[in-house]
Image: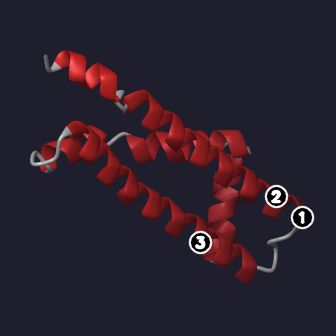
Amino acid sequence: MQVDSDIQVAYESGTDFSSEATAERIVSFSTQFLGAYQMQHPELDKQQALTSYIEVISAGIEQGFSEAIGVLEGLNVLEGDIEGNIDKTYQLVQDGIQGFIDKISIPEEAEQSTSL
């Protein structure tokens, strides 16, 4: 079965599959294209582009977690540690996305002072 083979290859690669490392990979990959998104949407100011981009990546993240859960349910392994790790990873991803938003967002006061 291809899934078993893919899992074995991933395991043997030495990749860290902890909740923390997985969440970090998801957040890093998901957030790296903000600049390209802004270039594709010049009609949006920086904050509008960030908000819109977050909506797009959040939908993808939700879909990804939903599909992963579906696969694990299909394999009858979504229980115990696996279920807990998925929940933990999901929360860490949400925290990471919020951290990205906080880092990139321009506080309203700072934006007003730079435009004066």
**Residue 6 x/y as whole percent:** 62, 64
| Residue at position x 37%, y 32% in the image | 105
- In the figure, 85 relative to 74: above or below? above
Q: Mark 2 or 3 closer to N-term?
A: 3
What residue is disc 2 on?
84
- Toward the bottom, the furthest residue is 74
What residue is disc 3 on?
66
Q: Is residue 104 left or right of residue 41?
A: right
Mark 1 Cα shell of 10 Å, populated few (<14), some (14-19), many (≥20): few
**Residue 51 x/y as whole percent:** 34, 49
What residue is disc 1 on?
80
Report the number of numbered marks: 3
Q: Secondary structure at mark 3?
A: helix
Q: Secondary structure at mark 1?
A: helix
Distance between mark 2 and mark 1 Cα atoms: 6 Å
- Which quarter of the figure has residue 85? bottom right
**Closer to the camera, 103 or 33?**
103
**Residue 21 x/y as whole percent:** 65, 39
**Residue 4 x/y as whole percent:** 69, 70
Check contact, mark 2 vs mark 1: CB within 8 A.
yes
Amino acid on which disc 1 is placed: Gly
